[in-house]
Image (cartoon, rainbow, N blue to C red):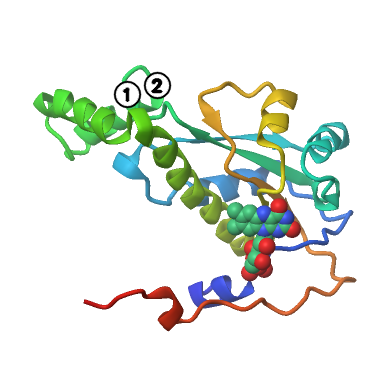
Amino acid sequence: MEFRKLMEERRSVNYFDPAGQVSDEELKKMVALASLVPSSFNLQPWNMIVLRSPIDKARLRKVAMDQPKITEAPVVLILLADEEGYKENNPTVGKVWESMEKKGYMKPEQKGWFLGAISKLYGGDNSLAFAVKNTAFFGMGLMLAAKELGLDSHPMDGFSREGVMKEFSIPANFFVPMLLAVGRFDQSKKLLERNWRKSYREIVISEL
Ligand SMILES: Cc1cc2nc3c(=O)[nH]c(=O)nc-3n(C[C@H](O)[C@H](O)[C@H](O)COP(=O)(O)O)c2cc1C
């Protein structure tokens, strides 16, 4: 789909077609496309839990303000932002380094600099911002990829973070930035018109 059309047609869809399934193949394609979003040092500090079974979606709905789309959508993703995704012992960091070295982004002798730089930039008080900003790009990638594949989605932060962490035994290194319902819009329903957006003048606070 042309990019302009993709941006214009993606909506947060409240009503999912109960018969509109999302295949494993479609979900994998969606994730592969979304994975092309940029991330700090290509560290990709995102993971997710995929919920498909009605029982598990009901468990999630219970801790997510009883939002009906959670049980109506065929797939719900719990996005996870890894606050430890910059640490030397994280397997992703090793793979990122290997790839950077192999592809000529960095020389072998720069490994110490790389590990020091990511630890300084993203460690301590910065780890939450690091994890969440990158995972939010991934979330946007998932929503656009869904649309490209003929699917619809709905992001949600109407949930109890503590409740979700507990219900799904999510390890403490993860922050849950959003849930994402994925499926197909129920064509028998009507979405409200696209809501107001800030103008250029309202977005720019100074032009220097
Ligand atoms: C991070 C995030 C969290 C959101 N949380 C909820 C939510 O919990 N429930 C809900 O109904 N909509 C939620 N929304 C959807 C927004 O209300 C919606 O994106 C906005 O009104 C613009 O509509 P559009 O996505 O159709 O353009 C969320 C959107 C984002 C990006």
Q: Quadrant of the C terminus?
A: bottom left
Secondary element under disc 2, as helix, strand or loop, is helix
- Percent coordinates x, y for residue 92 in the rendering: 39, 27
Between residues 38 and 32, which one lies in front from this camera angle? 38
Q: Position of residue 99 (x, y in %)?
A: 28, 33
Q: Which label number is shown at residue 94? A: 1
Q: Quadrant of the N terminus?
A: bottom right
The quadrant where residue 62 appears: top right
Say whether marks 1 and 2 touch (CB < 8 Å).
yes
Question: From the viewer's perspective, is 88 left or right of 202?
Answer: left
**Total marks placed:** 2
Q: Residue furthest top?
A: 89
Instruction: Classify 10 Å Cα crowding around label 1: few (below 14), some (14-19), many (20 and above).
Output: some
Q: Secondary structure at mark 1?
A: helix
Q: Is residue 55 left or right of residue 207?
A: right
Q: Residue at x 23, y 26 (%)?
A: 115
Q: Residue at x 82, y 58 (%)?
A: 16
Q: Nearer the viewer, residue 167 or 92?
A: 167
Residue holding disc 2: 91
Q: Quadrant of ligand 1?
A: bottom right
Residue 7, by quadrant, is bottom right
Residue kind at label 2, given as amino acid type: Pro
Q: Find residue 42 and report its horizontal and vertical position in percent.
A: 33, 41
User: Is residue 91 left or right of 187 when viewed as pictured?
Assistant: left
Q: Residue at x 48, y 81 (%)?
A: 199
What is the x, y in percent for residue 84?
A: 42, 26
Mark identifier at residue 107 = none
